[in-house]
Amino acid sequence: MNPKKIWANLAVADLDRTAKFYRDLGFKPNGLGSSELTSFFVGQDNFVIHFFLKDVLRANLKIEVADSQHAAEVVFTISAASRAEVDAWEKEVKNAGGQLISGTEAFGEGYYGFLFADPDGHRFNVFYMDGL
């Protein structure tokens, strides 16, 4: 199999809050917003993340959706170009209303980053690695 494209579909409680949070972090809206979803391009490759109202996603997929406030269904990693950029991300996440799960820290040889959750509990790791 050779998929044409892959994207993420995540459940949220409040579309306006979600849209504001990701706009405040500088994510680029992709124009697919509606009364049921908001959507953003992420990174240089324009990875798409759709944020659906939880009830809409549950009904469309016909499955139970994980409670992201208490469990991680996936952890996205955002690549940073430097340690300073990781530090800048940490400040922006705080200012946008994200929850820091772990503060910035060095770990292993040449690794530096932190983990945060958006207002709905979706986890992101901002990560810098020497030579990446």
Image (cartoon, rainbow, N blue to C red):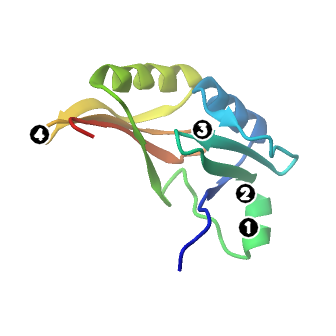
Do the residues under discs 4 and 3 have CB atoms within 8 angstroms?
A: no
Residue at left offset 77%, top offset 35%: 16
Neighbours of disc 1 within 10 Å: few (<14), some (14-19), many (20+): some
Earlier in the chain: of badge 3 and badge 2, it is 2
Q: CA distance from mark 4 to mark 2?
A: 40 Å
- Image height check: is 58 above or below 118? below
Amino acid at dot 1: Arg
Q: CA distance from mark 4 to mark 3?
A: 32 Å
Earlier in the chain: of badge 4 and badge 2, it is 2
Neighbours of disc 4 within 10 Å: few (<14), some (14-19), many (20+): few
Do the residues under discs 4 and 1 have CB atoms within 8 angstroms?
A: no
Residue at left offset 63%, top offset 65%: 65
Q: Quadrant of the C terminus?
A: top left
Earlier in the chain: of badge 4 and badge 3, it is 4
Q: Which residue is mark 2?
A: 54
Q: Which residue is mark 4?
A: 109
The local secondary structure at tag 4 comes to loop
Mark 4 or 1: in front is 4
Q: CA distance from mark 1 to mark 3?
A: 19 Å
The local secondary structure at tag 2 comes to helix
Mark 4 or 3: in front is 4
Do the residues under discs 1 and 2 have CB atoms within 8 angstroms?
A: yes
Neighbours of disc 3 within 10 Å: few (<14), some (14-19), many (20+): some
Question: Could you tell me residue 7's position as x and y percent?
Answer: 61, 58
Which one is in front, 33 or 12?
33
The local secondary structure at tag 1 comes to helix
Residue at left offset 73%, top offset 57%: 54
Earlier in the chain: of badge 1 and badge 3, it is 1
Q: Which residue is mark 3?
A: 119
Amino acid at dot 2: Lys
Neighbours of disc 2 within 10 Å: few (<14), some (14-19), many (20+): many
Earlier in the chain: of badge 4 and badge 1, it is 1
